[in-house]
Amino acid sequence: MKKLTMKKETNLTFEEGCEEYLLYCKARNLRDGTIKHYKESMKSIYRFIVPNIIPPISSFNQETMDNFILDMKETLQVKDTTIFTYARALKTLMRIFMKNAYMKKFDIALCVRIILFSSLFLFLHIFVISVKIVTCLSIYEFMEFLFLGLFLF
């Protein structure tokens, strides 16, 4: 016997989907601080994805994520890690929308260059500091420095 399934409404706006997600978070009894963080993230996303526009959630795709990241890079004067944080928040929302069948499922790719450039910069920064310090330290002091650096990283 075939099971009955309810067809979900797929014409939700982004704002309606976000409100539904916040209700879901409250039902899961998440901390107030966590819900507040989600609300702040949504405010940041709303600057680039108008919350109550006609294109419904069902029209979201990888291009939506790519345009979101590019718009932030052009508009905001912030570090790549901030952009990556906002992109992760949008990715989380999109995954929930996919889980609820509000949009088609696909693999959401964040801009990998953001991660690579940030990691490369950090590595080069640590390397330059290490080279500068190694000339002043004994081998044992240098090894201790490296161990401490790896521990803090």
Image: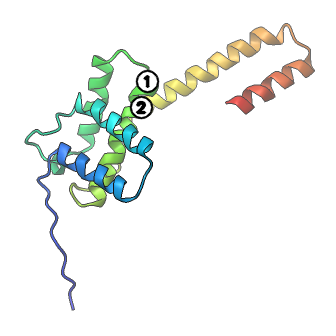
Label 1: element kind: helix
Task: Characterize the local packing of mark 1: few (<14), some (14-19) or many (20 or more) Cα atoms within 10 angstroms.
Answer: some
- Quadrant in the rendering for residue 8: bottom left
User: Which residue position is annotated with label 2?
Assistant: 84
Q: Residue at x 48, y 31 (%)?
A: 115
User: Between residues 32 and 95, which one lies in front from this camera angle?
Assistant: 32
Q: Residue at x 29, y 51 (%)?
A: 21
State how far apart marks 2 and 1 are (Cα): 6 Å
Q: Quick check: marks 2 and 1 in contact, CB under 8 Å?
A: yes
Q: Is residue 57 toward the left or the right of residue 125 in the image?
A: left
Q: Position of residue 103 (x, y in %)?
A: 21, 54
Extreme front residue here?
32
Q: Residue at x 11, y 43 (%)?
A: 55
Q: Amino acid at mark 2?
A: Phe
Q: Position of residue 26 (x, y in %)?
A: 35, 54
Which label sits on residue 80? Answer: 1
Q: Is residue 56 toward the left or the right of residue 118 in the image?
A: left
Q: Is residue 142 toward the left or the right of residue 86 in the image?
A: right
- Quadrant in the rendering for residue 29: bottom left
